[in-house]
Image (cartoon, rainbow, N blue to C red):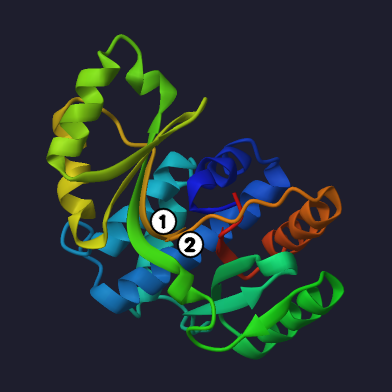
Amino acid sequence: MSGHSKWAKVHRQKTATDAKRGAIFTKLGNLITVATKEGGNDIENNFKLRLVVEKARAANMPKDNIERAIKRGAGLGDGKNVLEEITYEIFGPQGSAFIVETITDNKNRTISDLKSTLSKNNGQLGGPNSVIWQFDRLGIILIDIDQLANKNLDDLELSLIDTGAQDIIKSADGWEVITDMDQLQTVEKNIKNLGININESSLGYKPKDGLTITDSVIKEKIEKLYNALDDLDDINNIYSNVN
């Protein structure tokens, strides 16, 4: 659930049913609209837009959906929904902490749903900087395991570090390359120059110190809270300090 497990959410997105795929496309479309509104509709020069469009393409989002979302953000759509990104900080059981990124057209609805979910799942909403100070804002690049086949992994790891990677977290799904926030574009470009296709590239949060929970009852409560938050329609990303 922490910044070390972004692969889990990506895997769930890729294996979603048709019904859930529609919800994923809606969330991606909203992100595209917000990114366009903030930085313009030039994908090459709007880094945030390029990241989310690449994510949408990786999720097989139809081209028409992507174009409509860009037009909406550029003020060329129907103009019915005004979207905004809001980040919330949450206290969970036993010292667990969560950062929740939302994207919404109705912040009153979002905060109401969030508070209701927290009250039912041992969570509490925190104020500004009550939780976020425990995390670093970093770049996260995901590389599929099949992109690592037939490569000298030791040499590749050294090469990635030389190009600016701060850390490399390895799993059965692939590698999660961590960079400084302002180095994300550079490291992403260097990885592509090595002939490696990137699964996803984004900015995210990584806990400064991971929290290990050994009590099975507490673990279950934290997992229940995480899943309840993940089920909310307006939630875009969840980060936790729990290992």
Could you tell me how far apart the alpha carbons at marks 2 and 1 are, in whole angstroms? 6 Å
Q: Which amino acid does label 2 sit on?
A: Gly
Q: Which amino acid does label 1 sit on?
A: Ile
Crowdedness near tag 2: few (<14), some (14–19) or many (≥20) residues, C-alpha within 10 Å: many
Among the 4 quarters of the image, the one containing residue 98: bottom right
Instruction: Please state the horizontal and vertical placement of residue 83, each as a whole percent of the image.
Output: 49, 80
Examine the rendering and report whether any part of residue 232 can be seen. no
Residue 41 figure quarter: bottom left
Q: Which residue is drawn at 50% across and 80% down?
A: 86
The residue that appears at 25% across and 28% down in the rendered structure is: 157
Residue placed most toward the observer, 95 or 81: 95
Whether residue 110 is situated above or below residue 48 in the rendered picture? below
Is residue 93 in view from this perspective? yes
Residue drawn 66% across the image and 68% down it: 95
Residue 163 image point, x, y percent: 14, 40
Element carrying mark 2:
helix
| Residue at the spot of label 2 | 29
Give the numbered dot on residue 66: 1
In primary-sequence order, the first of circles 2 and 1 is 2
Return the residue found at the far top.
150
At which x and y percent is residue 214? 74, 48
Reply above or below: 36 against 78.
above
Q: What element carries label 1?
A: helix
Q: In this view, does 169 lie to the left or right of 224?
A: left
In the image, residue 7 sits, relative to residue 106, either above or below, namely: above
Q: Do the residues labelled 2 and 1 touch (CB within 8 Å)?
A: yes
Q: Residue at x 49, y 42 (%)?
A: 59
